[in-house]
Amino acid sequence: MTNEAWQSPIAPGISWYQATAGERPEFPALDGSLKTNVAIVGGGYTGLQAAYNLAKAGASVTLIDGCRFGDGASGRNGGQLGTGQRWWPEELEEKIGYERSKALFDMAERAKRHLFDFAESNAIDIEYVPGQMNVAHKPGYKRAYYENAEIAALRYDYPHVRFMDEEETRERLGSKRYYCGVRDMGTGHIHPLKLLAGLAKAAHEAGAGLFEMTRATSIRRVGGKTLVDTAKGTIKADHALIACNGHIGNLEPITASHVMPIRSFIGATAPLDDYPAVLPGGEAVADSRFVVRYFRKSKDGRLLFGGREAYTADNPLDISRHIRRQIAELYPALKNIEITHAWGGTVGITLPRQPFVREVMPGVTSIGGYSGHGVMLSNYCGKLFADQLLGRSEELRLLESLNIPPFPGGARMRAPLLFLALSWFALRDKF
Ligand SMILES: Cc1cc2nc3c(=O)[nH]c(=O)nc-3n(C[C@H](O)[C@H](O)[C@H](O)COP(=O)(O)OP(=O)(O)OC[C@H]3O[C@@H](n4cnc5c(N)ncnc54)[C@H](O)[C@@H]3O)c2cc1C
């Protein structure tokens, strides 16, 4: 089946990314048992970066994914790199103090640099467009946005964020629905599936053993080794990485209690040639709602708009209708615009919305739960996992030391409790 027509078994819709990614390498399913130094479960950015970096260093590495690489969040996301962590640095300061907040901010800057360097050195055209704006949907947020730009420059050595008043915000968005914002020209947005496909190709060329359509059914430790079971064979490894993110299911209980799935949906409009006022500068946008609306223009002039979430496994019947309604709220002139592509993906979140990194059994590390802020961080965490195993760096410990707590409620109650909590916060966006 061609890439353009491929329907992922774990996510609804065929994305605009699929339609435009070009050649997406395909890999065989695992057929038989094998031994390897490092086994990796999950072929998104985290797993593939780990495989790439380990293989490049000469390690024997085997990576399996239950679907095609990129069927998880890595091939279907909003493509916004952002800056820092999921929280603004001043918000993090309140939770963990300045020193650790600054260390995490600097780490995210290294992650950004790493992504650019990786794409350039492997000649991957990620279609980078500079510029990202965070915008306030309520007038009362003005002071916080003003201070955000100031704090970034003065306390975080990051001079690229500038405050925008209401008039500038309206002009740069082409929408009257926001009251102010900040514009960050030190970051931007990319084509996520092109990055993913280029990464898979690079990992393959570096010598990693890559297998698609191969689901891990269990992971266990036996006699000092890790055994990863699949339908047609077992992988015996010295070390293992679980990089399943929001798709962890029942594979490993510690990860499952710390990383929960929520689903987010995106629509692509027909090209906006007749609407030059919409995002004339080409920046990406994320707003201040709890259910964040995130949007940007594609290279071919479409509006790629995300904003609907779901907290259960059911897919909305008509993703396009919801997305078009949200677009029309911000851009009334687009109320009848054609939605040419509509799709969804699974975001892995943690309770404090910070990444989860933990050794969940001897020799088995689990990484995920970037909470909607993983494009640059997941790529970097995959590399840091490899660095740690190769004895090159302990930087990953910075995230491990966050000691992410589990979701409350135990295996039976945590999904319904999360549903209730998220639904409540989502409701507050309406007032
Ligand atoms: C709609 C959407 C919009 C987003 N927008 C942004 C954004 O704009 N900016 C940003 O920074 N982040 C965004 N994110 C988040 C970002 O995409 C993720 O944080 C990142 O891609 C996580 O990568 P990953 O490799 O850890 O996980 P994933 O890409 O989710 O990969 C996990 C993989 O594990 C595989 N797997 C799971 N279980 C098994 C098993 N048992 N056996 C074998 N394989 C298994 C899955 O098939 C999947 O391919 C968004 C996410 C979504 C869904």
Image: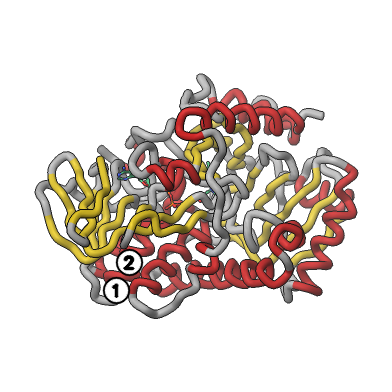
* Element at label 1: helix
Question: Dot 1, how many residues are within 10 Å of its Cα: few (below 14), some (14-19), or many (20+)?
Answer: some
User: At x 29% / y 74%, what residue is drawn?
Assistant: 56
| Structural distance between the alpha carbons of marks 2 and 1 | 6 Å
Quadrant in the picture for residue 238 = bottom left
The reply, left or right, for residue 314 in relation to residue 140 is left
Quick check: marks 2 and 1 in contact, CB under 8 Å?
A: yes
User: At x 68% / y 55%, what residue is drawn?
Assistant: 87
Q: Is residue 340 visible?
A: no
Q: Nearer the viewer, residue 254 or 314?
A: 254
Give the image location of residue 304, x and y in percent: 58, 42
User: At x 58% / y 58%, what residue is drawn?
Assistant: 81
Which quadrant is the C terminus positioned in?
top right
Give the image location of residue 150, x and y in percent: 83, 67
Please name the residue that numbered disc 2 is placed on: 52
User: At x 43% / y 42%, what residue is drawn?
Assistant: 256
The reply, left or right, for residue 7 in relation to residue 216 is right
Q: Nearer the viewer, residue 229 or 2?
A: 229
* Element at label 2: helix
Please name the residue that numbered disc 1 is placed on: 56
How many numbered callouts?
A: 2
Q: Which amino acid type is shown beneath numbered disc 2?
A: Tyr
Residue projecting furthest to the left: 32
Q: Which mark is residue 373?
A: none
Give the image location of residue 298, x and y in percent: 56, 48
Q: Which amino acid type is shown beneath numbered disc 1?
A: Lys
Residue projecting furthest to the bottom: 392
